[in-house]
């Protein structure tokens, strides 16, 4: 595979954004109303760094799949180099993940070094089991913007059937402990047919424990999900769940977010008003880097070879073979579904055809795909 080294711009000043917006040059003879709209240039603002593939759990839906068995992990020097590189590329918000990131021996150092490098928000996603509780006991609320805890159901019965015996109670205990110490704790739930019946109970539990936000997203048949396709909700089922979430959320103090992923045509105008810009490939707002060096923009493509780049000796080398951008550019000229039902979808989700073999809007007449990395609030802020 041929590779190309990217130039390394200087690290932007903290709190500033020297990149601004990408826009067409202004011509004096062109009226303001006819100018091409500016598009926010995300320039990999959100960095998702997988410092380890190891995890003590084997959740039935885990998108890491076979990576859990090979259990690669980055060394501390590799972590530092990767953070420095993407900070220079413009990243300012960092999420440390795994596997289970708190099992990495250099987890604490990684978090604190990231803050020293100028990452304005440092986040982690954890299963909140005992190894995680031990690490958080050595840390302070100021080490994080927030901590996300994975729970997959609103009861021990549904959660533990997916994540393993005792995981629900242990995770809630950890949530309560660190929330009491002042950490901003949030819950993330992967909704599927096994837990949709009580997933909304997490809103009540969050209020009781002191969690600030619960985020819901739909089960995807990637990673371990390939072997558990019967857990997947259909697009209409997910849309119906989101409707129930919108009805329930105002009853609770905790904020509720969700990733639409699929929606009815009449909802697209709302998302467009909130700032939805279609496929993540339009804004390049994020990058996910794995221990093997692969870097992806779209998480839906993690099981494919369509990665954006490779990290080699601390350098970003563009994958000039089959690449995510072959997909990302397609909706700019041809709609992924082959025809347009709602202009605000901005071409649909090109990755759906790769992963699922067809676009959701081809199968369901009233369904429009929404980039699964876009999130919305389930109640007025």
Image (cartoon, rainbow, N blue to C red):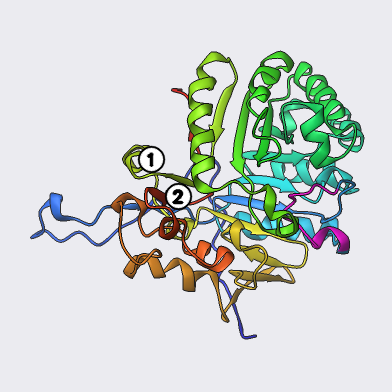
Q: Tell me the residue at 84%/59% (across/down).
A: 73
User: Camera-side residue: 219 or 184?
Assistant: 219
- Crowdedness near tag 2: few (<14), some (14–19) or many (≥20) residues, C-alpha within 10 Å: many
Among the two numbered marks 1 and 2 on one chain, the one whose residue lies closer to the N terminus: 1
In the figure, residue 340 lies in which quadrant? bottom left
Residue 196 rendering spot, x and y as whole percentages: 64, 34
Q: Tell me the residue at 65%/56% (across/down).
A: 221
Task: Say above or below: 350 vs 20.
Answer: below
- Crowdedness near tag 1: few (<14), some (14–19) or many (≥20) residues, C-alpha within 10 Å: many
Question: Can residue 217 be seen here?
Answer: yes
Label placed on residue 217: none
Q: Secondary structure at mark 1?
A: helix
User: Camera-side residue: 200 or 349?
Assistant: 200
In the figure, residue 127 lies in which quadrant? top right
Task: Residue under label 1, please give it.
Answer: 271
Q: Is residue 59 left or right of residue 232?
A: right
User: Camera-side residue: 327 or 8?
Assistant: 327
Q: What stretch of residues is rendered in magenta?
A: 58-69
Q: Tell me the residue at 83%/35% (across/down).
A: 160
Residue 31 rendering spot, x and y as whole percentages: 10, 53
Task: Residue under label 2, please give it.
Answer: 370
Question: Can residue 378 be seen here?
Answer: no
Task: Say above or below: 61 vs 144.
Answer: below
Q: Secondary structure at mark 2?
A: loop
Residue 204 rendering spot, x and y as whole percentages: 66, 17
Measure how far apart labels 1 and 2 are at the Cα level: 9 Å
* Tag 1 near tag 2, CB within 8 Å: yes
Residue 254 rendering spot, x and y as whole percentages: 60, 20
**How many numbered marks are there?**
2
């Amino acid at each position: 595979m041929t590779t190309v080294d990217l130039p390394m711009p200087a690290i932007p000043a903290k709190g500033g954004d020297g990149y601004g917006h990408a826009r067409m040059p202004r011509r004096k003879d062109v009226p303001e109303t006819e100018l091409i709209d500016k598009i926010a240039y995300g320039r990999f603002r959100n960095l998702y760094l997988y410092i380890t593939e190891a995890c003590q759990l084997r959740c039935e839906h885990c998108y890491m799949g076979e990576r859990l068995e090979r259990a690669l992990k980055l060394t501390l020097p590799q972590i530092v180099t990767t953070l420095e590189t993407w900070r220079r590329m413009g990243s300012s918000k960092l999420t440390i993940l795994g596997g289970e990131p708190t099992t990495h021996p250099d987890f604490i150092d990684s978090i604190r070094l990231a803050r020293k490098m100028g990452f304005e928000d440092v986040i982690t996603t954890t299963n909140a089991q005992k190894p995680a509780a031990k690490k958080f006991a050595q840390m302070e609320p100021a080490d994080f913007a927030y901590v996300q805890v994975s729970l997959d159901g609103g009861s021990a019965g549904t959660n533990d059937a997916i994540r393993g015996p005792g995981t629900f109670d242990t995770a809630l205990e950890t949530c309560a402990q660190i929330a009491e110490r002042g950490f901003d704790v949030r819950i993330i739930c992967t909704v599927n047919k096994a837990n949709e019946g009580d997933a909304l109970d997490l809103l009540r539990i969050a209020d009781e424990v002191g969690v600030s936000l619960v985020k819901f997203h739909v089960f995807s048949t990637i990673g371990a999900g390939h072997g558990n396709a019967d857990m997947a909700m259909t697009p209409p089922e997910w849309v119906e769940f989101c409707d129930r979430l919108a009805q329930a959320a105002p009853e609770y103090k905790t904020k509720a977010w969700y990733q639409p992923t699929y929606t009815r045509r009449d909802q697209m105008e709302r998302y467009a008003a909130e700032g939805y810009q279609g496929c993540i490939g339009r804004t390049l707002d994020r990058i996910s880097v794995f221990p093997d060096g692969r870097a992806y923009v779209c998480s839906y493509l993690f099981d494919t070879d369509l990665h954006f780049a490779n990290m080699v000796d601390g350098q970003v080398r563009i994958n000039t073979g089959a690449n995510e951008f072959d997909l990302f550019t397609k909706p700019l000229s041809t709609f992924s579904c082959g025809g347009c039902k709602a202009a605000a979808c901005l071409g649909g989700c090109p990755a759906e055809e790769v992963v699922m073999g067809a676009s959701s809007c081809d199968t369901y007449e009233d369904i429009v795909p929404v980039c699964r990395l876009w999130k919305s609030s389930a109640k007025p802020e």
